[in-house]
Image (spheres, coloured by chain):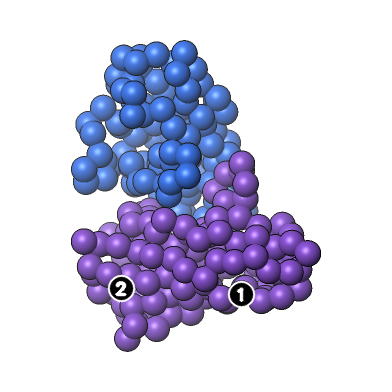
Amino acid sequence: DIQLTQSPSFLSASVGDRVTITCRASQGISTYLAWYQQKPGKAPKLLIYAASTLQSGVPSRFSGSGSGTEFTLTVSSLQPEDFATYYCQQLNSYPRTFGQGTKVEIK
Amino acid sequence: EVQLVESGGDLVQPGRSLRLSCTASGFTSGDYGMSWFRQAPGKGLEWVGFIRSKTYSGTTEYAASVKGIFTISRDDSKSIAYLQMNSLKTEDTGVYYCARDLLIGGRYHGLDVWGQGTTVTVSS
């Protein structure tokens, strides 16, 4: 199985900060990586697919990059509604594994 | 409105069975692969399994932890995907979500529509 390791697991930031989350895969997955945002008690929301393609309706302050084994999700200017947990997921092969999550909290 | 609604979650005893349903509206669910996920209390997301659309064979894939125990099926005439869960264990407790697969150029790239989730509690 492909393991995904996110870092950091926890991040404390202020409104307006630039935030970067990293997702590393245990083997190459090309660009078959998606990023999701999840708020407490809610379903995940797709932010980025194919490593760098912004899902329709997602604000342009979110961006993704990477290929192979290392990927990043960047929020250029953190907004109050962005405080949530973020997950990466690989869709290169089955099982479709997730990273352990990165919780972004208000400093 | 494109929507998925899960139902069927309940409190069940260990060893019993439960069937969850995922009802689609606002789109032709038969054209899409559908996935199931779960989230144990306070934990991260876990992929449970996936069923392809009939166009892509309608076959299934499962996580090792549920293979042979859980079964995913679909009734496209009713726009419903099912998750049949047998021999439930306490560790199967959690919120179960269904989601629609985003298919582009013949490859799956993510889950673009999610249901609100249904809660399964396995306890004696």
Q: Chain of mark 1?
A: B
Q: Amino acid at mark 2?
A: Ser
**Which mark lies nearer to you, 1 or 2?**
1
Residue A46 seen = yes
Residue A86 at x, y = what percent? Answer: 46, 36
Q: Chain of mark 2?
A: B
Q: Position of residue A91 (x, y in %)?
A: 45, 54
Depth check: B21 or B105 in front?
A: B21
For chain A, the rendered hue is blue
| Tally of marks | 2
Give residue B43's quadrant in the image.
Answer: top right
State the residue at coordinates (34%, 16%): A15
Query: In the picture shown, does residue A69 fall above or below A17?
Result: below
Residue A79 shown left or right of residue A27 in the figure: left
How dense is the environment of label 1, judged by Cα within 10 Å: few (below 14), some, or many (20 and up)? Answer: some
Give me the residue at 43% from left, 49% from top: A43
Local crowd size for mark 2, using a 10 Å CA cut-off: few (<14), some (14–19), many (≥20):
many
Give the colour in which the image draws chain B.
purple
For the residue labelled by badge 1, is the local secondary structure a helix, a strand or a loop? strand
Q: Nearer the viewer, residue A102 or B16?
A: B16
Q: Earlier in the sequence, mark 1 or mark 2?
A: 1
